[in-house]
Amino acid sequence: MSQASIKTEIQVLTNSLSLDEYMHMSASLIRRLRIPVHRPLTLIFGSRRLKLSVSPIARSKGFFLRFTDRIAEQLGLMDGDLLRLTYDRRTQTLKLGPLIGVLLPRQYASADRPYGSMTAFCQELHVASRIYGGLVYFFTPDGITSSEVIGLRSASRSFVRMQFPIPDIVYNRLTTRKLENTDSVQQFFTEVKSRRQGHVFNERFLDKNDVFYALARNASIRQYLPESHLFTNFAQLNNMSRRYRSVFLKPVTGSLGKGIIRVTRANGRILCQYASMNSTITRTSSSLKKAFVTIRSKVQGKRYLIQQGLTLISIQDRPVDFRALVQKNSKGKWTLTSIVGRIAGSRNFVSNLARGGTLCTARSALAQSNLPSSLLAAVYVRLKRAAVEIAEALDAEMPWHFAELGIDLAVDVHGKVWLLEVNSKPSKMEGTPISSGKIRPSVKKTLLYSRLLAGM
């Protein structure tokens, strides 16, 4: 952290006769941060800047800051909030924060679940902000205005609609590229980063072709990359199919296994398999040229990646892969938060939970698989190392700001680790149920990294 910050309780004076030009501060907080009193200072909270004088509260214990209800409303604060406070003597500036705005795709007409399945995650972020210091609010693109944000914040087990300053940090949880690329959202991101000197992390979806192209520039990462190209024509499909028993065609911007096609040579025939929601549809052709007619109809008008097929480890003939969550920690370093095994459904060749896949621990998945027992320990270490190395490399190669990545890895029958995909909007629901009152390591890292970004 750039300056010492103190976790400070916010108290709100209702129906107060106090002047709005003053903030009242506990004597112990004044002493700890060496804050001058009875002279105008600049208070910064997100994009809001106020000229206020500090009035000391004599014989007070603990660290707290009191505002009139009028000032608190301007800042989006409520009685009992717990934030970090810093003081810069050189600029005579007090800073409260961090102020974190979580950008979500939509708000539902529900008082208890305004963000649907993401509501529990929002509440968990709020609880974490009270533990580590900060304020988290939630908003949709409709809440963006030129100088402030209209959104919801958690309060006493419910959500309250308020006006907030533009935040120090925007945590982008939009779920569609269409919404993310709207002019209003992109202009807001630019405003936060350039004019407000704030930060936007997980600021965009990733394109599979861009990811593999960028990572291929890193010599130490190439070992994890199956051969991949932007799909163009039959000659390319024919060339790849001659060299590999199976090849995969994947939508460049797809997710949840949607649109994936597997093309396999078997006993002189060509098998084309398409992942449907509940099963796999298989079409058999006598030649690759005939199969290409169907393939072309499926991929026409879309950008696809053609990729080397892999012979993955399996459990009872069901392919297994791994999802690693990698995040930046309180020092800004990429670290592994979790890694789980994903077992494909009995009628599917993709492992996504949305298509019938199941989860278990990574160690359990390896132990149950057909991987030789002599390789289990070494492969587990390789998976964890690969996840962090890939995140570091991608961060270095890409111009956008990411704080967490979902990295999908696979292991072949020889124990070699391969990269399948990188997801810049990893699910907050998959395999990590939220326990009442318990903060997950992933949420803790989000709060601590936000504090780092805000200098608190």
Image (spheres, helix red, strand yellow):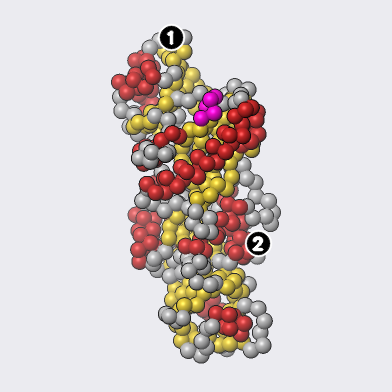
**Secondary element type, mark 1:** loop
158 vs 349: above or below: below
Q: Amino acid at mark 2?
A: Arg
Chief SS of the magenta region: loop
Q: Is residue 75 above or below residue 264?
A: below
Q: Quadrant of residue 369?
A: top right
Q: Residue at x 61, y 25 (%)?
A: 372
- Point out the frontmost of discs 1 and 2: 1
Residue ID for mark 1: 268
Q: Nearer the viewer, residue 371 or 186?
A: 371
Q: Is residue 59 left or right of residue 348?
A: right
Residue 42 tag number: none
- Residue 20 position, x and y percent, is 51, 85
Q: Position of residue 364 (x, y in %)?
A: 65, 34
Please name the residue that numbered disc 2 is placed on.
Answer: 157
Q: Specify start and end residues of the magenta stretch as a single range.
A: 412-416
Q: What residue is at 34 percent from the left and 15 percent from the top?
A: 289
Residue 356 in view (yes/no): no
How many other residues sit within 10 Å of disc 2, few (<14), some (14-19) or many (≥20)? few
